Image (cartoon, grey):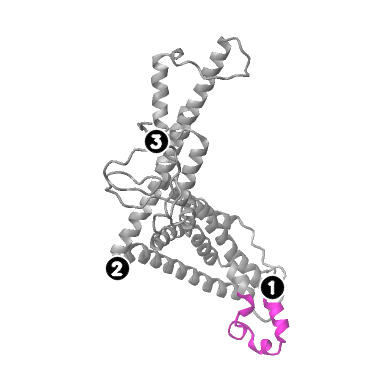
Amino acid sequence: MDKFRMIFQFLQANQESFMNGIRGIMALASAQVYSAFDFNCPCLPGYNAAYSAGILLAPPLVLFLLGLVMNIHVSMLAEEWKWPPGCRAKDPAVLRYMFRSMAQRALIAPVVWVAVTLLDGKCFLCAFCTAVPVTVLGNDSLALGLPRPKLARLLARVPCPDIYDGDWLLACDVAVRSLRCISQALGWSFVLLTTLLAFVVRSVRPCFTQAAFLKSKYWSHYINIECKLFDETCMEHAKAFAKVCIQQFFEAMNHDLELGHTHGALATAPAGSATPAAKDGAEEEREKLRGITDQGTMNRLLTSWHKCKLPLRLGQEEPLMGNGWARGGPRAPRKEVATYFSPECELWPSEEAGMGV
């Protein structure tokens, strides 16, 4: 069990490297899937192009969506995009930077699929077999005398040598070699163009927009780290909350059994019944709760975090409170529990400690 925990912690600490490895495996898997795919051209004039277009475009779309789904930042981008502005303004440049980063990584497997498909040539042969220049590669005198529908039906069978019966007009090997040569040329051109485009996007573009690039990169990292820290803080609070609740339950049950009662009256144990070590542990866990000790307050806190994130402005002597108050100096004492509202944000109730009545 400890080994699995260590592996999980390692993957959690190196999520980006792990996901890059997964994307590389997906790219290799896409090529392997294509090589194992049984390509069966229908060899009919009205269906060859549609079948080939589906083979060329549908799997890359599926691989692209899988690449986005497996990205750990896609949910964070969606949340940031739909997040209410509240006290913090949104920067569209940061959202665009995050989406471009995810899209570039998710495009690796689809690009590999398209390149392998074009280099193999079967899909291109099936799609454009009816466009073979018969007057150049075959018997042009016979081709001119054939009706166009009949010629199209004859050429549509070129990808199927077992049913092709037009050798008298055009040799099957000649048509196949010609179309596969064009397909491979397109495949290598596609590989070259995508490589140059990736080089321009990843290397050259930041040089011309260095300031904007650095700003977008910084705030993208900030959003990622803020989300992780908030999740870790919530997990720590939930763990402390659960631990205190369970301790109170067992202490109440123990006290109830000592009094000889049934489980009908679960009153809290007396203050002196716990050992000093248990008291210290309970106090430590209560400190981790940060004053949030009931379900309703926690729900309001989470709602407030969603509706009204704090502004990105540090340096105040006192943090921004639930009523939007951020001035320095001592505050006037209050002795009541109230819910404060700001013009833009609705936050959780706060209780002032150390107040005299």
Observer-nearest of 177 and 41: 41
Would you place residue 23 above or below residue 156 in this image?
above
Q: Which residue is drawn at 46% across and 13% down?
A: 273
Q: Name the residue under label 3.
A: 335
Instruction: Point out the frontmost of discs 1 and 2.
Output: 2
Membership of 239 in magenta stretch: no
Residue 346: give x, y in percent of width and height: 46, 49
Residue 14 visible within the image: no
Instruction: Point out the frontmost of discs 1 and 3.
Output: 3
Label placed on residue 189: none
Q: Which amino acid does label 1 sit on?
A: Arg
Kindly state the secondary structure of the residue where label 1 is placed. loop
Is 175 situated left or right of 104 in this image?
Answer: right
Observer-nearest of 169 and 257: 257
Residue 325: give x, y in percent of width and height: 35, 48
Magenta stretch, main secondary structure, is helix
Q: Residue at x 55, y 71 (%)?
A: 180
Membership of 152 in magenta stretch: yes
Q: Which of marks 2 and 3 is nearer the N terminus?
A: 2
Q: In the figure, residue 121 lies in which quadrant?
A: bottom right
Would you place residue 103 above or below residue 321 in this image?
below
State the separation of the CA atoms marked 1 and 3. 90 Å
Label placed on residue 208: 2
Q: Name the residue under label 1.
A: 157
Is 331 situated left or right of 282 in this image?
Answer: left
Chain part drawn in magenta: 128-155
Residue 327 visible within the image: yes
Residue lying at the far front in this picture: please name it.
Answer: 357
